[in-house]
Amino acid sequence: MRGLLATAARVLQQLTHDRRSVALIVLVPAVLMLFFRYVFDASPQVFERIGPQMLGLFPFIVMFLVTSVTMVRERTSGTLERLLTTPLRRGELIGGYALALGVAALVQALVSTAVALWGLGLEVDSPWAILLFAVVDAVLGTALGLLMSAFAATEFQAVQFMPLVVVPQILLCGLLTPRERMPDVLHALSDVLPLSYATDAFTELANANGFTSAMWIDLAVLLGCSILALCVASLTLRRRTA
Amino acid sequence: MMNNQPIEVSDLTVVRGGTMVIPRLSLTIPGGSVTGLVGPSGCGKTTLIRCLAGIQKVRSGGVTVLGHPAGSPATRSLVAYVTQASSVYPDLTVRQNLAYFAALAGADKAAVREALDHVALTPKADELTGRLSGGQRTRVSLAAALLADPQVLLLDEPTVGLDPVLRRDLWKLFDELAADGRTLLVSSHVMDEAGRCDRVLLMREGRLIADDSPDGLRSQAGTDDLEEAFLVLAERNAA
């Protein structure tokens, strides 16, 4: 536990020394929400449908990128090798990353949700549920980022994993068109991609009163996928290398 | 640690990418002393140190550190490995780096201050590590190892690029650590550093060509110059 908290604090300290990244993480989603609102100014029903879903998408994308690049850096700079010679457990390292970026995602979600609800007039019954799902989406992004970083030899490759891992999920998650209207094959594919459940949850959030049972299922699936990805990711941290 | 031979290597064989890097190497390293691991670049020094740290895949053979297999959980809080490239975070201050490694080792703030002092970096404590010179980063990396208060220190070329005064101070620190009963293995590709060790392992193409005190090496080779002694012993070994 000590190693997990120390690692989370260390990752957040690294972020705070990079002020520009902090500004980008915190402000860009809010600015993009503003864009979306006025791009669809003529048809407000589009923003009402997509707006909440976007709030869940940003933390997923941003934390996937931040994590995979940071972790590749950790692997190539020799610090990972060093950490593996200390008493730090692999699960504590991975958990520390997830915790730190979950905190960063909470700050991001606070700002983007506040802008969407009070600045852009988005109506949602339970704003706290938005924060909850935003953080869970961020942890999912972090988990997939940690996992994919094992397959990237350079930071450049890590960034290229975004079109491979993230973009198909965005296309299929129900953001562009509801999943029920997709061809059967694509619908079935979307059923096994975790981001679909994030988008479903935000769709529910926008329409339902309170925390529905469908949302509990989405939450369970998202947490399950995150934990699975984190476990596999910690297996990719090999103590002995050739 | 009442172990006279904290490090024991028997019949160690390492193959990397189809190339034999270390063929059946056996050696022991005594406690409470500074042992130099000297040889040209590419002779297998780093690979051997990685084996002792327990992070190198080995083909066969055994490596025991403080009575446990190298790299096993029991040894991880007792052994510190300082890599050749400074493996600390460039985007943290010196103090933040040390505080993180102290937390992992269960050390306190006093240990951080002491480690900073040992490597003469107290005035730079609040600067970003990435803005320091290469030699200063190496010292941050070394300090991060010292604060864990390890019994065994594996130092891969720790004095490269340091000015002579600092180099002398660090060797003095190594001697003090050894006098406290710790075991130090210090690699170097410069022969003149071998003279500062209690014992020297001369390595060439993955094999030990000598294992003796600096004076022993000189008399073995029949010369006062350690550089020359290496040449004599290497040629004798090849013949």
Image (cartoon, rainbow, N blue to C red):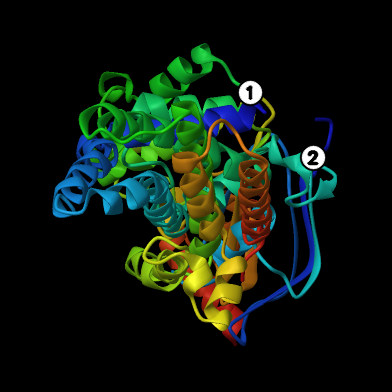
SS label for mark 2? helix
Which one is in front, B15 or B92? Answer: B92
Residue drawn at (37%, 34%), measured in percent from left and top?
A109
Q: Residue B9 carries which label?
A: none
Which one is in front, A137 or A239? Answer: A137
Q: In this view, does A64 lie above or below B132?
A: below
Residue B71 in the image, given as x and y percentages of width and height? 73, 50
Q: Looking at the image, is mark 1 or mark 2 earlier in the sequence? A: 2
Specify whether B59 is left or right of A139.
Answer: right
Which one is in front, A222 or B158? Answer: A222
Furthest-top residue in view? Answer: B110
Question: Disc 1, disc 2: CB below 8 Å?
Answer: no
Q: Which chain carries label 1?
A: B
* Identity, as a three-letter code, of the amino acid under mark 2: Ala
Residue B171 in the image, given as x and y percentages of width and height? 45, 35
The alpha-carbon separation of the residues under discs 1 and 2 comes to: 15 Å
> Dot 1, how many residues are within 10 Å of its Cα: few (below 14), some (14-19), or many (20+)?
some
Q: Which mark is residue B106?
A: 1
Q: Is residue B148 visible from the viewing direction of this image?
A: no
Residue A73 in the image, given as x and y percentages of width and height? 40, 55
SS label for mark 1? loop
Residue drawn at (50%, 14%), measured in percent from left and top?
B109
Q: Name the residue under label 2.
A: B74
* Identity, as a three-letter code, of the amino acid under mark 1: Gly
